[in-house]
Image: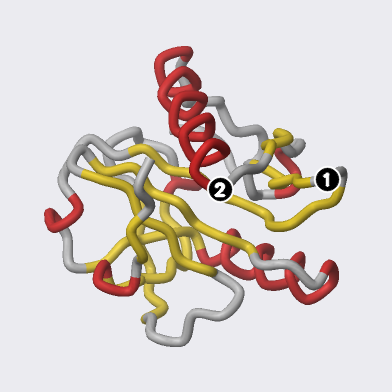
Amino acid sequence: MTALGVRPMYETEEDRGKEGSFIGDLCTAWQCEARKLPIHYKLDFAMMRDGAIKAFLETKVRNYTRDYFDTYMISMAKVLAAREYSAFAGVPSLLAVRWSDGNGFIALNSMKDFEVGFGGRGDRGDLQDMEPVVFIPIENFREVRV
């Protein structure tokens, strides 16, 4: 188990490759450019067009189908950060998910249909993997064709 201080990085080279492929597809579909954000921002990218930030983005790549779960679970801290960035910058903050059978997105700053609970991963023995989370109904995601 890890202490509550320094967290190990679980992201692998393969994970970064899948994320890179997904963000490339999103940039093509949305006609924008992605700039990686520092880790303390809690979200992954600033989405740019004509030199201006048009949205903030959190990306996730999953190895299961869209309908495997009824809801999508995300850290409440990420949702709160997304809402704060949107309120300050006046742009949307999006969550984009690549499932094994398609892609979807939702605006975290304006979603209304969700539940708050406690959850996370229990397979790594990391106490910090369990936290307050937001459960978003899968049907609330809009499809992204890439």
In the picture, measured across the screen, residue 73 lies left or right of residue 93, that is: left
Give the structural element (helix, strand or loop) at label 2.
helix
For label 1, the SS is: loop
As shown in the figure, which amino acid type bears the numbered disc 1? Asp
Question: In the image shown, does 143 or 119 lie closer to the viewer?
Answer: 143
Q: How far apart are marks 1 and 2 (CA)?
A: 13 Å
User: Which residue sits at x=43%, y=59%?
Assistant: 105
Q: Are marks 1 and 2 in contact (CB under 8 Å)?
A: no
Please name the amino acid that badge 2 sits on: Trp
> Which residue is found at the position 69% from the left and 46% from the top?
47
Classify residue 62 by image quadrant: top left
Q: Which of marks 1 and 2 is nearer the N terminus?
A: 2
Instruction: Read off the residue under disc 1.
Output: 50
At horizontal 35% and vertical 66% (from top left) the residue drawn is 141
Of the pair 15 and 144, the residue shown nearer to us: 144
Q: Image height check: is 30 above or below 92?
A: above
From the image, tell me which residue sits under label 2. Answer: 30
For residue 87, what is the image quadrant? bottom right
Q: In this view, does 67 lie to the left or right of 7?
A: left
Q: Position of residue 146 (x, y in %)?
A: 38, 40
Give coordinates of residue 135: x percent, y percent.
Answer: 35, 71
Q: In this view, does 31 lie above or below 23?
A: below
15 versus 30 height, above or below: above
Counting from the top left corner in percent of width and height, residue 44 is at: 63, 42
| Horizontal side of residue 77 vs 133, given as left or right | right
